[in-house]
Image (spheres, helix red, strand yellow):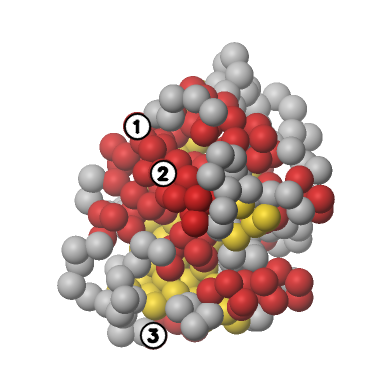
């Protein structure tokens, strides 16, 4: 699966993830400890939706542009309002011309004394990332999984965003080992993981690896957003968001986000599920 962020910018999965991130940051904003956000696969920062390399997928048309053309569900209104404001500032007053990725979104919503580190290995996307977030945030051309583990020694409160490209066969294994390493070193760390949902076999195998490698399992929430029944493993039939040590009251918000995304973008047989491992 090729998941260079730009190819899929503004699709339904981006909307679910970014609505969840906005809610998460709002819920922890009053915490007294300074925050460090580590984004293990940051991408380019934001995306020009007129770029032919990205526009040809037409996922933004079926995602953020479709959402903004109608009455936006309550759980997605903060994200829609933010995207609208970013576009207006960029000169797009009557259409969606850019889509902000997680680096820009996070930097626009954390406090001035908080810190953000975005990791990106692609040479082209790293150049864009550094240009778009520094000096507000730090861009590093390093393995995001290793940066996540190395940062567990920080004295700050920790929030990890893990959204791998799934171009390598070991991404699921790396997800498990990285989460296990983070939790073993910093049991209070907060983590939000995104992954595609294509078939139950792959998803269930990953869940089994978590149960095998992480014991005891910290507080967690798993949101399954199934746009359609999972019978065709050649399609991205939905996505999963896993929240580890989520903020208080996050569950109700995540459930609403999952249900609204499936309601807006799903097909017959689509469903949203929220549960804990």
Determine the secondary structure under disc 1: helix
Q: Nearer the viewer, residue 29 or 249?
A: 29
Q: Is residue 73 above or below residue 127?
A: above
Label 2, label 3: how far apart the Cα atoms are: 36 Å
Residue 238 location (% of width, % of height) = 60, 35
> In this figure, which residue is indicated by the disc labeled 3?
153
Where, by quadrant of the figure, is residue 191 drawn? bottom left
Of tags 1 and 2, the one toward the viewer is 2
Residue at position x 76%, y 60% from top?
Answer: 168
Q: Nearer the viewer, residue 201 or 77?
A: 77
> In this figure, which residue is indicated by the disc labeled 2?
81
Which residue ends up furthest to the top in the rendered image? Answer: 268
Is 57 displayed left or right of 209 in the figure? right
Residue 260 location (% of width, % of height) = 44, 28
The disc at residue 74 is: 1
| Contact check, label 2 and label 3, Cβ < 8 Å | no
Q: Is residue 222 visible?
A: no
Label 1, label 2: how far apart the Cα atoms are: 11 Å
């Amino acid at each position: 699966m090729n998941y260079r962020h730009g190819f899929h910018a503004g699709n339904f999965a981006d909307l679910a993830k970014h609505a969840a991130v906005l809610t998460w940051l709002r819920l922890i904003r009053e915490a007294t400890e300074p925050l460090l956000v580590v984004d293990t696969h940051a991408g380019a920062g934001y995306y020009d939706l007129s770029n032919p390399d990205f526009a040809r997928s037409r996922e933004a048309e079926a995602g953020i542009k479709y959402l903004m053309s109608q009455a936006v569900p309550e759980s997605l209104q903060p994200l829609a309002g933010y995207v609208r404001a970013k576009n207006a500032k960029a000169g797009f007053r009557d259409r969606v011309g850019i889509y902000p990725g997680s680096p820009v979104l996070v930097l626009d919503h954390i406090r001035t004394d908080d810190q953000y580190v975005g990791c990106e290995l692609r040479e082209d996307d790293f150049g864009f990332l550094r240009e778009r977030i520094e000096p507000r945030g730090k861009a590093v051309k390093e393995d995001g999984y290793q940066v996540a583990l190395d940062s567990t020694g920080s004295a700050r409160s920790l929030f990890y965003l893990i959204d791998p490209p799934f171009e390598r066969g070991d991404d699921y294994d790396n997800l498990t080992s990285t989460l296990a390493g983070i939790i073993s070193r910093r049991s209070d760390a907060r983590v939000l993981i995104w992954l595609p949902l294509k078939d139950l076999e792959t998803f269930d195998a990953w869940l089994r690896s978590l149960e095998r490698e992480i014991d005891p399992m910290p507080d967690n929430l798993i949101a399954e957003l199934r746009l359609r029944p999972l019978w065709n493993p050649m399609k991205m039939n939905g996505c999963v968001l896993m929240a580890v040590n989520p903020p208080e009251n996050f569950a109700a918000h995540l459930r609403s986000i999952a249900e609204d995304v499936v309601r807006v973008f799903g097909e017959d047989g689509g469903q949203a599920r929220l549960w804990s491992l």
